[in-house]
Image (cartoon, rainbow, N blue to C red):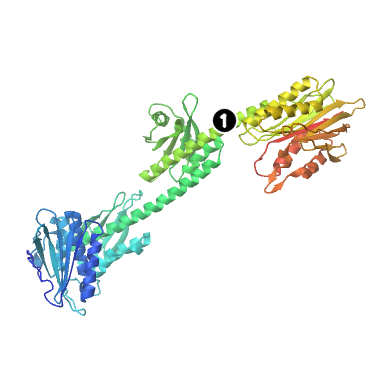
Amino acid sequence: MPAEVGTRTSIPSGASSGTLVRRARLPNDRRTPAAARALVRSVLEESGLDTLLNEALLLTTELSTNAVVHANTDLDIEVTADPTGLTVTVTDFAPGPVEQLAVGPKNESPDIGEVAERGRGLLLVDHFASRWGTVHEGDGKGVWFHLDHRDPDGGDPSRVPVSGDSPGLGALTGLLRGGSDRQTDEGLAELAHDLLSRLARLTGAAGGVIRVDRGDGMGRQLLARYGRAPRDNADTIRVPLTPHRPYSGELELDAAPVGYAQSLAAMVAERFSLHLENDRLRRADVRRQTWITFLAEASELLAQSLDVNLTMALIPQLVVPRLGQWCAVHTTDAWGRLQLAAATHAEESALAGLHTTLAESGPESILARLEEASRLGSQVMFGAPLEGFAVPLVARGSRLGTLAVGRHAKHRHDADEVAVLEDVARRAALAIDNARIHDERRKVARTLQASLLPPALPRVEGIGFAAEYVPTGSEVGGDFYDVMPFGDDRWLVVVGDVSGKGVQAATVTGLVRDVIRILVDDGKSLSEILHRVNRTLVQRGGGRYCTLAMASVTRQVDGGLGVCLHLAGHDRAVLVRSDGRTTFVGEGGTALGLLETITSPDAEITLRPGDSLIFYTDGVTERRRGRELFGSARLEEAAAPLAGYPADAMAARLRSTTINFSVEEPRDDIAILVLRNDA
C-alpha cells in the first residue's frame, strides 16, 4: 500500500474510549532515542498492539535520532494508540523547513545512492509505515507515521519482507539493539554473521561479507561471510563501517543498490559500527590494563636494582620484544658524549649487526640522531636500516642519555605504545640516577670507612696479625680495628663498635681511634686509656656509645705472648689453643660513653706457640638466617678446626663461614681480627 505523504494538521486524540495518548518532551541527548522507544513500548503494551512493536521501535529510533543528531534541539514525541493502529509524531524546534524526500510508488523507488544519509530514515518510514507525513505546529516541525493494526496470526507481507523461514525486521532490529553479550571476539564474529544472514534474506541478496581492520598491522581481515562472496560489479552494495580510528571496515552485499537494500545495508553498517566501537574500547581498556601492569612490574624490577650496570642491562630486556624489535641504552660521559651501555635484539643473530650500526658515526648515522635527542631533550625518529625512534633519559633535570627502540617487524608503534615507551624511559632514567646516587654514596662510605681502618697491619717477627672487614650497604658503619706499637716490643690490639651508622657514627669512630692513638703515644696505661676515652665520649660523643676490646701484647723470654685483655662492654674473645681446644676469655666491663665512671677488669692470657686469640664485633654473632642467629657457639665451633693455620687464613675462613651462614645481605658490619703466636 503506497504511503501517504503530506502535512498533517491534526490527529484525533482521545476521540473514543479506545484511544490512548502519551506526550513527552525529551532533551537533546544521546539517550533520547532510548527514552522515546521506552515510551512507545509502554503505549503498545498497554493498548495491546504488541504486533507493531518491531516496526514502531525501528521508526521511532530513526526519527528521534534524526531530531537529536541533525536538528540538535529538544524534541516532543506524541504517541497515539487506537483500534486502527499506532501513530507516532516526533517534533523538533530547529529553524528551516523539514527535509523533503520525494517518494513515489513502490515500483518507482528512488536511487538510494542519490539519497543523503539524513534521508535514509524517511525511506524506512516510507517503506514500513502505513502512511506518514510532516507536521508544523507553532515553532515546531516534525514527522509522523501511522502503523495499521494487524491480526497477530496474520500480517502484511508488503510491510515486512518475509521469504520462507527468513527472519523479519523484528529479528534484525533485535540484533541491532542487543549485543551486550557479544563483547568478545567470538561474539562479535557471531553477531556479524547473524546480521549478514538476516540482512541478505531481507534484501534477497545472494551473500555478503564484513571485513574489519583493527589497525594492528594485519590489514583488513574477514570477520563474517554469508552465502556467495560479492563480486566486483554494479550489483554489489558496499557500505563503509565507521568506528573510530584505528578501526575501519566495510560491509559488502551481493545485491543491486536499488529499492531499500542500500538503506537497510547502511542502517546495519551504522549500527554494527557501534558494536565495533565497543570492541575497540574493550580492547583498548584491556590493553591499557596490560600496560599498567607492565609498567608496575617494570618499576618494581628497576627499583630492586641499585647497581648501575645491572640497571642499564635490565632496561632493554624489559622493552624487547614487547615494545620493539630492538632496544639500546646510551649514557652520557663527563664530556656529554654518548656511549653504548646496553643493547639487545629480538633475534640474537642480529645483535652483532645492531652493535655495528650503532657504532657508526657521521651526520646521517643513528648515533647522530641519538645525540640530537639527547641535546634537544625531545623524541626523534630515524629510518632504515634500524627504523625506530629515540627518547631522552632525563631524571631530576639532568640528561643521562637516550633510550632507542626499533619498530616491530610487522607494524609501527601506535600512540599507546609510544606513550608507554616514554613512561618506561622516565622510570628507567630515575632508576639509573638512583643507582648512580647509591653507587656514589657507597663509594663515599667505602672511602670514609677505609680512612677509619689501618691501611695495613704491622708485620712482626713471631707474631701474626690478620683482619677481615665486611661493610654493609651505602652507610658507613661504626666497626673498627687497629694494631699499634705500645712501648718497646709491645703492641696494642683494639677492636671496637660505635653505636649506629652514618656520618655521625663515623665521626665518633674517628674520634675514639684518634684519642686512643694519642694516649698510647703519651704512654698511658690501658686502664687510663679506657677512662679517658669514656670521658671524651660522654662529653663529645653526641649520645653515642662504644664497645671496645683492648689488649696489650708482650713478648716473653720463653717464646710465649703475654696478653692483658680489657673488655668495655664488648663480646669476649675466642682463645684457640694449638691442639684445637677453644674457650671464651675476658671479663665484661662497662661500655664507653654511657656513664661518668666505668669498671674495666682485666684478664691475663698467655699465648703459647701456635695459640691464637680471635676478636670480633657483633656483626659476626648476630648474622641472621631468618630468625636464627649465627651465635657465639657456632663461632667457637668454626674456630676449633682452624688451630695451626696462619692468622690470615683463620680470619679469611671465619669471614667466609659467617657470610655463608645466610643468603641474605649482612645487616651489620663484620670485623674480625686474629692475633697468633707464630714463634
Residue farthest to the front, as pictured: 596
Tell which of 336 and 572 is nearer to you: 572
Q: Nearer the viewer, residue 557 or 307?
A: 557
Q: Is residue 43 above or below residue 542?
A: below
| Quadrant location, the N terminus | bottom left
Q: Circle 1 sits on which residue?
A: 440
The spot of residue 341 in percent (x, y) is: 51, 33
Looking at the image, how many numbered discs can be counted on the residues? 1
Q: Residue at x 78, y 22 (%)?
A: 520
Is residue 555 shown left or right of residue 249?
A: right
Q: Residues within 10 Å of mark 1 (few under 14, many from 20)?
A: few
Circle 1: element type: helix
Q: Amino acid at mark 1?
A: Glu
- The answer to whether any part of residue 456 appears in the image is yes
Pinpoint residue 351: horizontal percent, then vertical percent.
49, 38
Quarter residue 80 falls in: bottom left
Place of residue 424 in the rendered image (x, y in percent of width and height, measured from the top left):
45, 41
- In the rendered image, which quarter contains the C terminus? top right
Question: Considering only vertical position in the picture, is 81 above or below 275?
Answer: below
Q: Is residue 576 above or below residue 410?
A: above
Which of 621/187 is in front?
Answer: 621
| Whether residue 411 can be seen here | no
Closer-to-camera residue (522/665): 522
Left or right of 236 on screen, residue 625: right
Tell me which corner region of the image, top left, top right, bottom left or bottom right, holds residue 594.
top right
Give me the residue at 30% from left, 49% from top. 245
